Image (cartoon, helix red, strand yellow):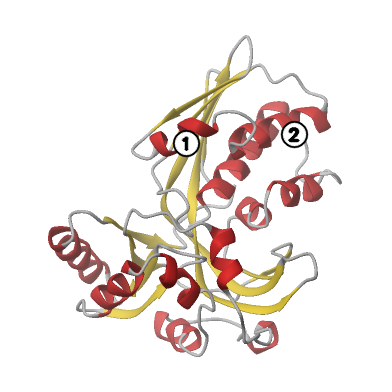
Amino acid sequence: MQIEQENAERIIFAPAKINLYLNILERYKTGYHSIDSLVVFCDIGDEIKIEPSEDFQLKLTGPFSRYLLDKTDNLNLVTRAATSYADIAQKPLDFKITLTKNLPVAAGLGGGSSDAAATICGLRQIWQLPENEEYLGALLLNLGADVPVCMRCEPSHISNKGQVINLAPPMPEIPVVLVNPLKPCPTQDVFTRFKGPFKESTLETLPDSFDTIYDLVAFIKKQDNDLYEPATQLVPEIKNIVSALSLQNGCLISRMSGSGASVFALFENEESAQNAQKHISEENPDWWVKQGWINRVERY
């Protein structure tokens, strides 16, 4: 996440999180699941702006802000992140926060989690608090399983409920196309439909590095997204998107991200990705289609 400072303002980019694969290892008695996933971040995302105000305000803008208008209270992750951090750090929350919502909601791209992490990042900078406060880990996890890895904002292998994070092997920047059918795919509903089988962790099988995009794709193809079938029961269009991306010239792999309904495709080069974005947008005007780069996001 990149931060700009001017007149005590902070503008923080909140990137989309992409699950290159997602294995389910077990189901806990609490109903939560242990996962195994390789995640990356891309230069497509939301934006958080923090500026001084007499009291706390949250403003929503952007193409998908209307889907959050009924969540401007503590149900909104940005508000929860700001108020929780202010309480535990014992700091006044005299700021106006503007969330520019560019990512679809309930899309499997970690948008809300990335927004929460960006909010905490900006407030931490303003309050000049250290990155390693003991309470920060528990605060992030309490906001959501994806928030800790979104706070790190770098390629990572995650396991357990998301709180066990290991740095991923080095990998190149990769052209990517993201597509969403603009139909929500609630995470809880998807996990509820998952019935197994369970997998083994891939942590020990990760190589020392992915020297080329082809090395990475070869490894990903050995894995899966265990939530794909449950998600397509809720949003059948996901299968159409995977197929449409797979048929594009230069596409190396097409998979659903997270719990859906967004699908990503990795491409050999930027030209192929741009052409795919253009073709799919023209053929499916009702879909959200964006082209960008994986691993072209600075750590914040």
Residue, disc 2: 84
Q: Which of marks 2 and 1 is nearer the N terminus?
A: 1
Q: Nearer the viewer, residue 191 or 21?
A: 191
Q: In this view, does 81 lie above or below 232?
A: above
In the image, what residue occupies the spot 65% across and 89% down? 205
Give the structural element (helix, strand or loop) at label 2. Answer: helix
Residue flagged by tag 1: what amino acid is it? Leu
Residue 8 in the image, given as x and y percentages of width and height: 58, 20
Residue flagged by tag 2: what amino acid is it? Ser
Residue, disc 1: 68
Quadrant of residue 279 within the rendered picture: bottom left
Q: In this view, does 203 lie above or below 6?
A: below
Q: Is residue 266 above or below residue 51?
A: below
Residue 114 in the image, given as x and y percentages of width and height: 56, 48
Marks 2, 1: nearer the viewer? 1
Give the structural element (helix, strand or loop) at label 1. Answer: helix
Q: Does residue 267 appear in the picture of this structure?
A: no
In the image, what residue occupies the spot 44% across and 56% down? 107
